[in-house]
Amino acid sequence: MHELSLIQSLLTIIEDNAKEHGFTKVNRVSLSCGRLSAVEPAALEFAFNTLTQTGICAAAQLELEILPLQVYCYDCNREFTSPDSDPTICPDCRGDQVMVTAGLQELQLLELDVD
Amino acid sequence: MKINVVTNILDANNRIANENRAFFDEKKVFVINLMSSPGAGKTTLVEKTILALRERFRIAVIEGDIQDSYDAERIDKLNIPVVQINTGGACHLDGNMIKETFAGFDFDNLDLLITENVGNLVCPAEFKIGENAKIMILSTPEGADKPAKYPLMFGESSVLLINKIDLAPYVDFDFEKARQSAHAINPELKIFEVSCKTDNGLKQWFAWLTAAIESFQAGREKG
């Protein structure tokens, strides 16, 4: 639901950058967010396509890198990159003595490819 | 041409939230952002908190809902200043919506502003509004698996109130699992088990909030 708000904010940032750097066309927008950041990639892409029918991003591709979920397991005494999205279980021993160490990063704009 | 920008998408909102926070700080108003799924007991908690702390602190409330003003009417009955925000479909409050309510309050005669967010376990967690603390409620009928399913809000909050503990025996709520998984996401999370119906456990929440407001006010006096 909040993907529209996120894309609106993104477009404002891109317009500010267009003024600063003087570009008129965006080819690619690179974003990243943590696995647990509550951003739904399909909804994000839909919002982006809907809000960029015209304007400098009309032909732009949206690229979203999802940063993995990492949990530290106190039973195994090591950190794992979790293949599933449950942050409360160790992917190895399936125990629940874990702590999330990465995966909650907010949505970030990394790079713009522009003309 | 490639431009390296590296900007948080919510920077624009964060900027407004920081401006709100600076304004609240100057007025010595402690602000909480209360979040939960719909029906977890936010408005009842707000009512109970007002009744318990109104002798000690001057309180006002912002009610966030997609539409209608039922919640604001409940607060208004307690003779507490309240502004209703209707988001008109938006699933969360943001910094700008909060800023637009400023004209509705007398901040010079206020100690605590309670902001009741739109009922939603996902989106409100992402949008700062200028609060001192995010407080969330999980009610026992929702189940103990919610931290695993909605980790962001548990990660962002300072306090988790597990509400409706009077219903726990009927809905098989697993307290240990809820505590364990909430702390896996956020080891600092303070957890209180309460029932807004029987008032069980609420004293600890009132004590926490009182201490938080007093420590904030003491800090502002010095600063």
Image (tube, helix red, strand yellow):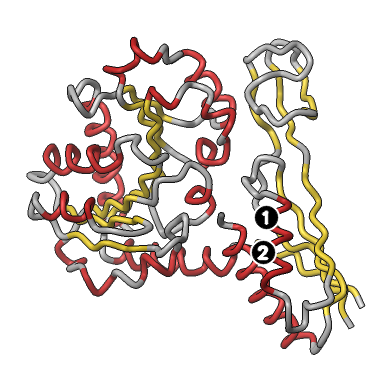
Pointer 1 local density, CA inside 10 Å: few below 14, some 14–19, many at least 20: some
| Circle number at residue B36 | none
Q: Name the residue rendered at 28%, 24% in the picture.
A: B194
Left/right placement of residue A40 relative to residue B75 reads: right
From this view, report whether residue B129 is shown above or below residue B37.
below
Q: Quadrant of the C terminus of chain B?
A: bottom left
Subunit of label 2: A
Q: Position of residue B50 (x, y in %)?
A: 16, 44
| SS for dot 2 | helix
- Give the position of the N terminus of chain B as an image quadrant: bottom right
| Amino acid type shown at disc 2 | Ala
Query: Residue A56 appears at what percent x and percent y?
Result: 77, 83
Q: Residue drawn at (23%, 51%), measured in percent from left and top?
A: B71
Q: Which residue is mark 2?
A: A47
Determine the residue positioned at 52% across, 63% down: B14
The quadrant holding residue A46 is bottom right
* Residue A43 badge: 1
The kind of residue on which mark 1 rests is: Ala
Of B9 and B140, nearer the camera is B140
Quadrant of residue A85 in the image?
A: top right
**Residues at marks 1 and 2 touching, judged by CB atoms closer than 8 Å:** yes
Same subunit, tags 1 and 2: yes
Determine whether, in the image, residue B198 is placed left or right of residue B98.
left
Give the image quarter of residue B82.
bottom left
Q: Chain of mark 1?
A: A
Query: B190 or B115: which is nearer to us?
Result: B115
Residue A5 is situated, as x and y percent measured from the top left of the image, at 57, 64
